[in-house]
Image (cartoon, helix red, strand yellow):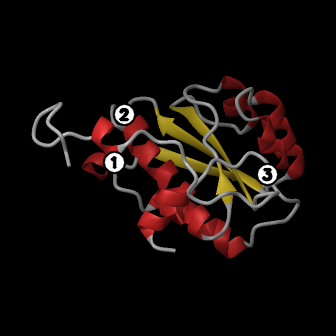
Amino acid sequence: MDAFEAVRTVLAVRRYANRPVEAAVVRRIVDAARLSASSINLQPWHFIVVQERATLEQIGAVMKTGPYAASAAFVVVVVVEKASPYAVSDASRAIQNMILVAWAEGIGSNWTGFGPMPAIETLLGVPTTHAGLAVVPFGYPEAKLGSGRKKRKPIGDVVSRERFGTPFA
């Protein structure tokens, strides 16, 4: 799948099949995060891959915006350096890269949570120099999804040319 097709068709997945994701694919997904662009190349992130079912269930119990993390094949917990002014932006780019690479491999995901996650940080032994930004569950979708069926505003409503309000068309 080419990059634009992945962007055009990716959908949030909240229900996962009881099927493991191959180790090479997991590595490819997290490598997409590691390879993301980073302001001044500081790379103020750390990615924690969680696959143990008991820990996934604990994460699902804590994540009010993502209890379905409990049934994912794995999650990536993204933590960022508290001292970095670029951390949220840089890690957000990395999260989107993971989501798109996973989708291209037939694996669904969805960003859950945003900002400090003390319970997750404690559970996973995150040092005090870092704060949780997101928990991203991954897994093969439980059901076939309608690829590309998105409700988005028309391009003319959200894109201008040269100055705000000048039609892009």
Q: Residue furthest left?
A: 162
Q: Are marks 2 and 3 in contact (CB under 8 Å)?
A: no
Q: Which residue is nearer to you in this view: 20 or 118?
A: 20
* Disc number lying in front (2 or 3): 3
Question: Which of the 4 image quarters holds residue 123?
Answer: top right
Pinpoint residue 59: horizontal percent, then vertical percent.
78, 37
Seen at 42% across and 65% down, the residue is 4
Whichever of labels 1 and 2 marks the residue nearer the N terminus, that label is 1
| Spot occupied by residue 162 in the image (x, y as percentages of width and height) | 10, 41
- The first of marks 2 and 3 along the sequence is 3
Residue type at numbered disc 1: Leu
On the question of residue 44 being in view, the answer is: no
Q: Position of residue 19 (x, y in %)?
A: 85, 65
Circle 2 residue:
84
The residue identified by callout 1 is 42
**Percent position (x, y) of residue 153?**
42, 39
The disc label shown at residue 72, or none: 3
Structural distance between the alpha carbons of marks 2 and 3: 30 Å
